[in-house]
Structures are given as structure tokens and as C-alpha cells.
Amino acid sequence: MSETRDAGRSGANGVRDDDPAAEAPLGRLLRLMASLRDPVAGCPWDVAQSFATIVPYTIEEAYEVADAVARGDLRDLRDELGDLLLQVVFHARMAEEQGAFAFDDVARAIGDKLVRRHPHVFTPDGAPLPAGSPRRDPAAVEAQWAAIKAQERAARQAERGADSPEPDPVPDPLGGVARALPALARAEKISRRAAAHGFDWDDAAQVVAKVREETDEVAEALAAGDPEAVSEEIGDLLFSVANLARHAGIDPETALRDGTAKFERRFAAMARHLAAAGGALGRSDLAAMEAAWQAAKRDEAAGGP
């Protein structure tokens, strides 16, 4: 039986801990999740979940947050952040049931990490540095951040000790980038890691040339009729585009999301132009659709609907 079935206790202020009106919002959320996961009186769906089954929802909610930000909808952002927080609470509750860690451990760990990785902002005990303390320039801060992360990885490897596989004498210089990231975002992070080791183009113009080279190689693979080669070359092309976005200071995921939204918007406008001319998608030939597409682009450039 979960702790939510325990008799209520009085807190330091004399109010019963199980009094719903006295609960802090986060405490209430943790209690509700514990009740949902109660094996006897909880929700069958929630009880049946595992880390693996919840992960897709966690990823989806993160994208919902990004969408609310992109739309500038702060009310939706509030709700989507709540949905994302629920995912954190859900994972933490399942871990607590297994005796691994609890939500407080998650919050404490990220707080400790923030202090550890920002010695230019906090003292070791987490207090802000005194006013007037020297602040490092962005490049020095980034280098310091990378060095601290490397120390953390080494410390974690040491903690795992015998339970860890034999360490590679030459550690993977690109390791640690989550494989579950969207492919385009992971490509950008991998290329950034490589650039930190000095393996990079000098400027964006050189990356543009690489993109053109990869496009030519895609065309050659298509002409040869080799599906495996086509897949490989398109992968190389996309990786080069991710590099180009990095050099241009553009987030590739955001750029692709915006590009897709633009296509959706123009496609809908194209359908309206076809309808106005007595046509329709599926009944119009490519020439008519192209003319309607160009009309949609002109409308957009002129600030039309």
C-alpha cells in the first residue's frame, strides 16, 4: 500500500499534512501520482506503465512545450509545462517504488549540478557570488563547462567501478550525446562536439560547398539505381545541412519545423486558389497546382491570407 494511504500527520505549522487545502502544489502533484500508482486503489492504466512505456509520452510533451513557445501561447505553455512536469513526477514515482530514487533526489541532483557547473555564479555551497566578483567571458565559461562535464563523466565511471565495462583506453570523444534525440538535433550536437576537438570547417561558405558536393553524390546514387547508396548519401547530405545550420547559428530542428509549417501554410493556400478557380486537389494537374502554388507565394509575400 502506498504512503498515500497512511494516516495524516501534523506538520510544523500544526496543519495536517493530508489536508488538501494546505498542500503546496508540488506536494499535491506528488501525492496524486502516488495515488494513481497505488496497486490496489489506483488507476489500472497508470499502474501498468513502466519507464519504457512512458518515455514516448515524455518526448511528446517536450515537443508540445516547444510548439507552445513557437506559437507564443503562454497559456498553452503553462499547461504543457505541467504535462511535462507530470512526466518527471511519473518517472520519479516509478523509481521510488523500486527503491532507486525519489523526486526529491531528482530535484537535489539538478540543483547540485547547477551549482557545480556555474562556479562563476555560485559559491560551492550554492550561495550567489558576492556583488562585484569577476565574471568570465562566454568563451571561458563554455570551456569551463566542458571541463566540468568531463570531470563528472570520469567520476561517474569511477563510481560504477566493477559494475562498469572495462574503460576504453581512448574514450569516445563524441560519447554522451543521447541516442534518443531527434536525428537532426543529434547530428548538430555531434558536429558541435567534433568542432570542439578542432575538426571543423573554417566558415559557413565551406559547408555550403560540402552540401553541394553531397547533393551531387545523391544524384549519382539515384542515377545508379542503388537504394542503399541513396540512403547513405542522403544521410551524408542531412548531416552536412545540420553542420551548415550550426555554422549559421541556426537550430536545425527549429529551422525544419518552421520550413514545414511554411509548406503547410502555402499548401492550404494553394488548395484555396484551386477551389476559387473551380478545381480541387486530386483533380487538378501539376501545372494548375504549380500556378496555384506560385499564387499562394505571391499572396504571402504581399501579406495576404
Image (cartoon, rainbow, N blue to C red):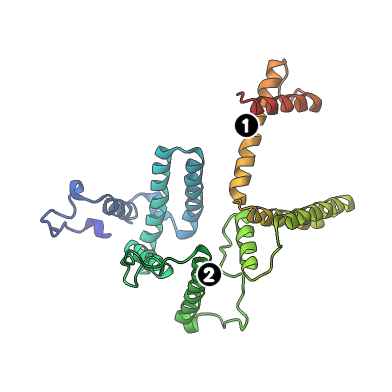
Depth check: give the residue in front, 43 or 149: 149
In the rendered image, the residue lying farthest to the left is 14
Image-based side of 55 in relation to 250, left or right: left
Per the image, label 1 sits on a secondary structure element best described as: helix
Is residue 49 visible to the viewer in this orientation of the structure? Answer: yes
Foreground mark, 2 or 1, reads: 2
> To which residue does mark 2 refer?
143
> Which amino acid lies under the numbered mark 2 shown in the image of this protein?
Ala
Q: Quadrant of the N terminus?
A: bottom left
- Relative horizontal placement of residue 67, taking residue 262 as reference (left or right): left
Of residues 294 and 204, which is closer to you in this image?
204
Check the image and report above or below for 288 versus 178.
Answer: above
Mark sitting on residue 167 = none
Q: In which quadrant is the C terminus drawn?
A: top right
Q: CA distance from mark 2 to mark 1?
A: 42 Å
What x and y, as percent, mark residue 68? 47, 41
Label 2–label 1 contact, CB within 8 A: no
Which residue has dot 1 on it?
Answer: 265
Query: Dot 1: few (<14), some (14–19), or many (≥20) neighbours within 10 Å?
Result: some
Q: Mark 1: which amino acid?
A: Arg
Q: Is residue 263 above or below residue 294?
A: below
Label 2 CA crowd tier, 10 Å (few <14, some 14–19, many 20+): few
Compared with residue 154, is residue 8 higher up or lower down, i.e. above or below? above
* Mark 2 or mark 1, earlier in chain: 2
Q: Where is residue 65 drawn, in percent x and y?
A: 47, 46
SS assignment at label 2: helix
Tally the numbered discs.
2
| Residue depicted at x 57% and y 59% | 180
What is the x, y in percent for residue 142? Answer: 52, 66
| Residue positioned 60% across, 49% down in the render | 253
Residue at image point 69% right, 26% down? 298
